[in-house]
Image (cartoon, rainbow, N blue to C red):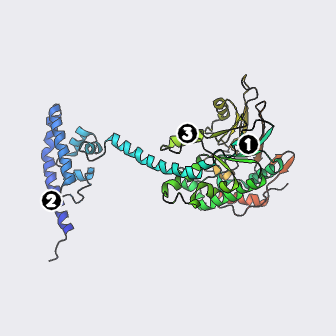
Amino acid sequence: MKKKTDRQKQMERFEKACEEAKTRRTANRCLRERYRDDPQAALDVRKRLISDLIRVYNSPDNPWAGWAASRKRYRELGWYPEIIVTDLFGTHEEFSRAAGLRDKRGTSKVKLVTARLSTEKRISDYAIQSVERHYGKWDRETRKKHGVKTVLVASDFHGQFVDPFAMAVLLDVIQKVEPDGVVLNGDIVDFPKVGRFTQIPGAGNLSLQAELDFVRDHIIKPVSEICPKAYKIWLMGNHEQRLIRYIADTAPELADLRALRWDQLTGVDEMGWELVFGGNWLAPMQKDRTENVRRTWKILHDCFVVTHGRSIAKNAMDAEISRYGMSGTSGHTHRPGVWTMPTLAGKNLCWTSTGMMAGAAVGKDYVSTPSAWTMGFALFTIDPKSKTVIPHLVNIYEDFAEFAGKVYRPTKAAKKVRRKQWEGQPAGEWRSYFDG
């Protein structure tokens, strides 16, 4: 006869204990009549129940002893019917708390916050090394208050979803105008693979490395080369925070490697870009990270605010100008527009919303009706002396754009890239994607 294993013997004891428990539960049903109208009896039964749950937790007949006092296990080994547990504790979770087998609500909350703060500390340490060291790099230039300044602002590129035609127009305008400053106003990257929302269909084909290489080689680098003397500023939007948080959280031991630093990955260090982030990297809750984007802004030449913005409402520009009390610009809405609000304190106030630099593919999964999103950027003439800002919107449509009398039209190659983007495919090699 084959000798029984220890596990088999244990399971036999478990089955025997279950039969005994079933008999006891049947006998204990009568307890329900005793405590219904007697508070003292109810307290006594509660104590007996708690002792019984602890017995189940520590029982040598429990094959999962030491960690199993679940609802299922108590149904099998408990001496009291579940209806009594429900009467006196409401839920098995509360039953376990009363027996000291589960954290109290306050304790659980403290532990959760402590764990989150530990993560946030790693993120903060990473940001200090790779982001904060680039704060204020161009303050000397952006604080100048004499002479008329020209600043170009573009936002919402969304990495490899940037429209090739829009990008070509942007670079040509920068080359022609030679602005005093260029501001990339948030969401220059997309990073769908490490985002918390539903990914754009096909976005799984876009690797993190491919997007980083693309942004560095086809957005940051060409802008840097075209305007070497201009100040260059990158405001951190919610999409920029995605990779920063991901690296610091999932690979904390590697995050301090030079090769994994944000400024090295994007090329902003070697190309002389200033980074702007006005929030707090210790942001354990999503609402805190949302607030960080709202707090990220910079004043140029003492009279012009740049911020990515958070509102997507039709009156977003009105809300922004009321908030700052100063002329400025924001992105995020993907809808270009100008809102004027002259006041006694600022007779020439206006707020400009820039269009997106991304193509239509970036929004096809979120907009079911004809989209109000429009491509484009804006050029600003700033007179610090009179605190006057005059915006020049450059709207870019699918097949047509114009600036200073020059007409732009996309090439067949640009249209081919758009089709690839629509399918979630990498854009491939870029050339000059406009005729004109």
Please name whichever residue, 330 or 251, is drawn nearer the observer in this view of the structure.
Answer: 251
Closest to the observer: 234 or 13? 234
Residue at 65% in and 35% down: 316
Please determine whether, in this image, residue 428 is positioned above or below residue 51: below
Position of residue 71 measured from the top left corner of the image (x, y, whole percent): 27, 49
Q: Looking at the rendering, in which quadrant would you find the N terminus?
A: bottom left
Left or right: residue 68 compared with residue 171: left
The disc placed on residue 79 is none
- Judged by depth in the image, the label closer to the viewer, 1 or 3, is 1
Q: Amino acid at mark 1?
A: Glu
Q: Which mark is residue 16?
A: 2
Q: Is residue 185 left or right of residue 114?
A: right
Amino acid type shown at disc 2: Lys
Q: Please tell me in which quadrant of the rendered image residue 370 appears.
A: top right
> Quadrant of the rendered structure where residue 347 is?
top right
**Could you tell me residue 192's position as x and y percent?**
58, 54
Q: Label 1: which residue?
A: 141
Secondary structure beneath dot 1 equals helix
Which residue does the numbered mark 3 point to in the structure image?
291
